[in-house]
Amino acid sequence: MTRKRFTKPLVCISTSTMLSARGNYPIHATGSLNIDCVERFTGCLALLLPASGARLDSDAKDDLVDRIDGLLLTGGRANIEPHHYQGEAFPEDEIVDPERDSVVLTMVRACIAAEVPVLGICRGIQEMNVALGGSLHYRLHLLEDTDDHRMPQREDVSREEIFRLRHPVRLTPGGLFERLAGKEEVMVNSLHGQGIDRLADDLEVEATSHDGVIEGVRLRDDRSFTVGVQWHAEWKPEEHTLSRRLFEEFGRAARTRARLRDT
């Protein structure tokens, strides 16, 4: 029997754990926009990665990394627990997702080691930084001379208002982002409370906000495509040149990985 030749690369999409509508069992989920962007802008197939660290032992992790061509790290409501970066303990009422932490931090390191392309969005850029040894600010809006980067705190806010372009980011001269955007500055949305504090040694800054918050990073000496952004690039990339180009480049790198795996 001839083995079927697969034509589309496979991209794993991180999920978060939450309770069902009735609150009686856990589910693993991500926003549909993340799946849509993989299908529309990368030319890849999307596969949701359960946030279940108990199932991802060393053998399972290695097996999964060998089979995939990209890893998309999505946003999420919960913050990364501070013990992963020697930070101060969270308040007792802080929303956390230890299963996602366990899975994603492990997968980031494994994918980078295997040169699997990685694109991190919002929580995803923070996961990349922590996985590689960096740290996070718990609440940016409590820092002196730093803006409030959270979504609008009103109850009646619309989705369009939540994701509207809020502030400019300056792109590193001569960097990847500047080349993809074709300009020195772009406007982005902003929906995050935490942010990068100490940048991991293996990462380089690609974008910063006017108040000094790191908004984009790239793996130093990257041999595939390992990039993170603090804004939600999955929101209408067809109207945002840099976000669209990042998804396209992520897809190109995934297709290159797929070809190499198939030889």
Image (spheres, rainbow, N blue to C red):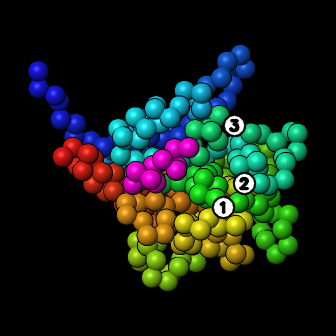
In this view, the residue in front, 127 or 201, is 201
Q: Are marks 3 and 2 in contact (CB under 8 Å)?
A: no
Which type of secondary structure does the marked residue at label 2 adopt?
loop
Residue found 58% across the figure and 78% down from its top = 170
In this picture, residue 96 sits left or right of residue 180: right
Q: Residues within 10 Å of mark 1 (few under 14, many from 20)?
A: many
Amino acid carrying mark 2 in the image: Tyr
Q: Which residues lie in the magenta part?
A: 106-115
**What residue lies at 33% left-to-right and 56% top-to-bottom?**
253
Q: How many residues crowd around disc 2 within 10 Å: few (fewer than 14), some, or many (20 or more)?
A: some
Tag shown at residue 85: 2
- Residue 196, image x and y in percent? 68, 63
Residue contact between numbered discs 1 and 2, judged by CB atoms under 8 Å:
yes
Residue position marked by numbered label 1 in the rendering: 134
User: Does 3 sit above or below residue 234?
Assistant: above
Which badge, 3 or 2, comes first in the chain's sequence?
2
> Measured along the vertical axis of the image, is residue 126 above or below residue 35?
below
